[in-house]
Amino acid sequence: MAEPNTRVSLWYFLALILIILLAQQYFMTPKTENVNYSDFRKLAESKGVDDLLISTEKIEGRLLPPGVEYLSKTRNDPKLPEKLKEQFKNEPVRFSTIRVQDQDLIKILDRQGIKYQAVQERTWLTSLLSLILPTLLLLGIFVYFFRKIGTGAGGLMSVGKSKAKVYMEDETKVTFADVAGVEEAEEELKEIIEFLKTPAKFQALGGNIPKGVLILGPPGTGKTLLARAVAGEAGVPFLSLSGSDFVEMFVGVGAARVRDLFAQAQEKAPCIIFIDELDAVGKARGLSPMSGPEERENTLNQLLSEMDGFDTRKGVIIMAATNRPEILDPALIRPGRFDRHILVDRPSLKGREDILKIHTRRVKLSPEVNLNTLAARTPGMVGADLANIVNEAALLAARKNKSAVEMEDFEEAIDRVVAGLEKRNRMMNPREKEIVAYHETGHALVAEALPTTDPVHRVSIIPRGIGALGYTMQLPTEDRYLMTKTELEDRMAVMMGGRVAEELHFKEISTGAQNDLYRATDIARSMIREYGMSDKLGPITFERERRPLFLETMMPPGTKDYSETTAQEIDQEVANLIARAHTRAREILEQRRETLEKVAHVLLEKEVIEGDELRQFLNSSSEGKSASGPG
Ligand code: ADP
Ligand code: MG
Ligand code: ZN
């Protein structure tokens, strides 16, 4: 829409310039009587003209009364004097003639004492060109550059056309039956659905209906889905717009869209306005120094003012979703705006099972498929991941020409989603493979030796994706919200297990432990800085909560509010924790040297060892039975 529009207005602009120029020409150029050159020459000889303006193209001047008489006579037009008098009224009668190359003219003029003067030519055409040409040139350059930007990715000119569209769905056809694992959120949204169903009832009572509902949660947890389900449950239209569309918006367009959205909503009421990815528009003002914050600010301001000027009782609910509530402008979450917050967290074990149930509704499952087991295999995964796994599993089964999706397809799909696509064809040289086998076995043995860590589900040295050369997958038996100090320390010991195994077998270390060290250090740092788990420093937290916008006082991130000495002590304590984890892993593996060798060899051969198989190895060996306690 934007492109034809701008083109049209461009032509309007050009036409306007032309009209102005022509009008100027018409009104500004004095009227003249055209005279042919031979007559002019006669007029000059008889002093019938005066005050000549001579240019290269023509001669203009004043006709004197005798000259008019003469013309009337030579043209055989007795009415000419009256006509001219009529035409020129109170001004002198002017004439004009095309100039002819005439050597004698000046002599005649001098002889007759006629005043003359040379002037620069300025026809209407030249004046037009002198104005139009540069204008055209400028416009051309302008248009050219706009086109150029416009054809680029997400172009400037196409923005208004293709992006930031207001999507209108009269029926979303999504209900709560399509969403699982978010029961609390559903419960909280019931009131809103009631209101949307029968706004009149609430209007009559004058109840206080929330204006704005903000859905918060990690990506892929079903925030968008939930908002659409609310519309579906209430049976009202769903008007949506994504905040990220505003990011590279033309000046004024974002604000206009918001105005549009609210105007449309008024007409459609009762309905839901949904602004997805609110953080893109609602970033705190002045938070990002780069990339034209003004336009977003315009949009945000427009949104705020629309929300303020909005009467909820008309039956319009404004919903928004974000996964970054901490960067939202505080003005957005003030009472009267998005003051109702609904948290959609990662699904629990039960939630994941229910989500899998929903997504396998239309998939033909083999009877042995156990969704509960699959849910247990996917801790931390969100609805979008699970949907992806089901889809992937169905594709895998189809590729193998199966009549139903089997457990093994799901297993493979999970592996794919977890660690990226299997890259069997990526060749590791034998030495590398050996190192990885010992490294992974080290992780697995330490994990099995410690009582608080999750049992090992599978050890693999098949490279997956980028960076991960092998992996040891542990299967948590339950979802965790809290972790004790012992558990964290055990986890760190497991991470150290890989490197320790390398040390023991090769008397040499490799770069393969980089990620383990990174994660272990991360845990150690959190234990000291955030959870106050250091005996030496005591139960103190050194980490400020990084949510400056919910607290009204802003504090620039990275400000330390402890002394340099304390900082050194923190570093020392972190190092101690790591060292202790390393020692523990070493103790465990030194006691299980034989098992380490045995399992690593089997792993080298088979590339994959399942958890149960691993435990059989451990049970058949007599090593380390005494050391399997914590500490
Ligand atoms: P978000 O907006 O939180 O990033 P979406 O709503 O876009 O997540 O979810 C993407 C897809 O993942 C959905 O279309 C749906 O198929 C699936 N999904 C996510 N969460 C759930 C859930 N709680 N129940 C069922 N499906 C879900
Ligand atoms: Mg979304
Ligand atoms: Zn490792």
Image: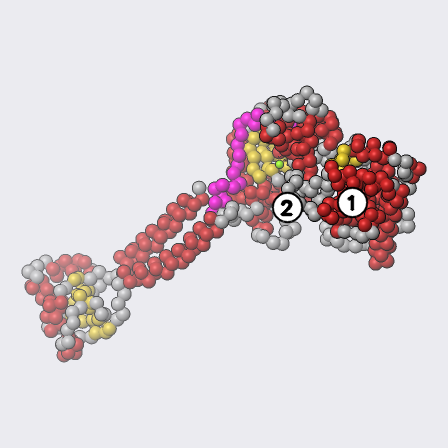
Asked whether 334 or 253 is in front, the reply is: 253
The stretch drawn in magenta includes residue 172: yes
* Quarter of the image that includes the N terminus: top left
Q: Nearer the viewer, residue 117 or 457?
A: 457
Q: Nearer the viewer, mark 1 or mark 2?
A: 1
Q: Left of 79 or right of it: where is 617?
A: right
The yes-or-no answer for disc 1 within 8 Å of ligand 3 is yes
Q: Nearer the viewer, residue 71 or 271?
A: 271
x, y percentage for residue 128?
31, 59
Reading the image, the residue beneath label 2 is 283
Q: Residue at x 74, y 48 (%)?
A: 431
Q: Is residue 252 magenta?
A: no
How packed mark 1 is, by other alpha carbons closer than 10 Å (few <14, some 14-19, many 20 or more), is many
- Its colouring scheme is secondary structure
Q: Magenta part mainly helix, strand or loop?
A: loop
The type of residue carrying mark 1 is His
At 73% across and 52% down in the image, what residue appears?
A: 557
Q: Please, what secondary structure does the residue beneath circle 1 have?
A: helix
Q: Quadrant of residue 565?
A: bottom right
Q: Which residue is mark 1?
A: 439
For ligand 1, give the image quadrant: top right
Indicate whether 62 appears above or below 7: below
Q: Residue at x 82, y 46 (%)?
A: 501
* Residue interval drawn in magenta: 156-180
Tell me if I can see residue 145 in this picture.
yes
On the image, the x and y values in percent for residue 223 come to: 65, 34
Quarter location, residue 627:
top right
**Residue 84 higher or lower than 608, as above or below:** below
At 73% from the left edge and 37% from the top edge, which residue is drawn?
A: 606
Q: Three-letter amino acid code at disc 2?
A: Lys
Q: Are marks 1 and 2 in contact (CB under 8 Å)?
A: no
